[in-house]
Amino acid sequence: MAHTHNNAPVAGLLLAAGGGRRLGGRPKALLTHRGRPLVEHAVAVLRAGGVERVHVVLGASAAAVRERAELSGCVLVDNPEWADGMGSSLRAGLASVTGTDAPAALVCLVDQPGIGPAAVGRVLAAYEGEESLVTAAYDGVRGHPTLFGRAHWEGIARSATGDRGARAYLKEHADRVTLVECGDVAQPYDIDIEADLAHLEP
C-alpha cells in the first residue's frame, strides 16, 4: 500500500475544537454543510484523500459533537484547553498520534470546507518518511493541509502556542518544507464570521 513506512499509514489529524466565538459561540464542528455536521464532512474528505486513520481533536461542546456527529472509526481526542487557541489542539492531537505507529500526521482544520480530497491527496503524495515537512500552498502562500513527519512532532508541539499552531516551526525550517501548490483544486477560506457561512451548502 502507498504512503506507508514499516507498513504504518500516515495518520490524519483533524483540529475541530474551535468554539466559533465570532459565530455567536456556535462550535464549528457542528455547523451544517451538505446536510452533515462540518466535522463529519472533514473526516470524509480526509478519508477520500487517502488517509484512513483519523484523530479528531474536540473542544467546544465536545459532548454535543460526540452525540450528534457520526465519527465511528475515528480516534476522538478531548482538548480541555481548546479556548487557548489552535496551538493547544495541535499539541493534543500530536500527543494522540505519538501513541501510534504513524510515521507522519496530515493536519486539516474543520473550518476549511473549500479544501477537499484532491488537496489532501497531493500533500499525502509528497510524503517521504519521518523527516517530511509538507504544506499545501495557494498561489505560493502556505496553507493547509500540512504534513509533519514524526521527527518534527516534538519540536512543533514545543513551539505551538496560542493560535500559532505550527507556523513558527515551519518558518524556522522553511528550507526543509515542501510546498505543494493546490490553488487549482481547493480554496483555503476559513469559516470564522457570519459572512463566511455563505460558503456552507445546506
Image (cartoon, grey):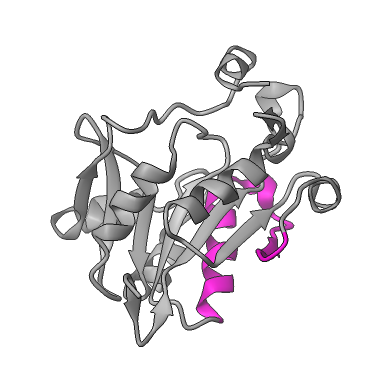
Q: Farthest residue in the left direction?
A: 175
> Is 94 one of the magenta-colored residues?
yes
Pick the residue in front: 136 or 168: 136
User: From what the image shows, is residue 124 above or below residue 131?
Assistant: above
Does residue 189 sit above or below 50 in this rendering? above
Residue at the limit of the structure toward the front, as seen here: 1
Image x and y of residue 95, in percent: 56, 72
Q: How many marks?
A: 0
Whether residue 23 is in magenta: the answer is no
Please give the range of residues in magenta.
Answer: 72-99
In the figure, is residue 13 to the left or right of 155?
right
The quadrant holding residue 36 is top right
Left/right of residue 190 with respect to residue 27 in the rendered view: left
Of the pair 80 and 136, the residue shown nearer to us: 136
Q: Position of residue 76 (x, y in %)?
A: 69, 63
Q: Position of residue 80 (x, y in %)?
A: 74, 57
Residue 144 appears in view? no
Describe residue 139's horizontal placement relative to residue 187 as left or right.
left
| Picture residue at 40% right of the left edge, 31% below the top | 188
Taking 111 as reference, is 61 left or right?
right
Q: State whether residue 163 appears in this view.
A: yes
Q: Position of residue 82 (x, y in %)?
A: 67, 50
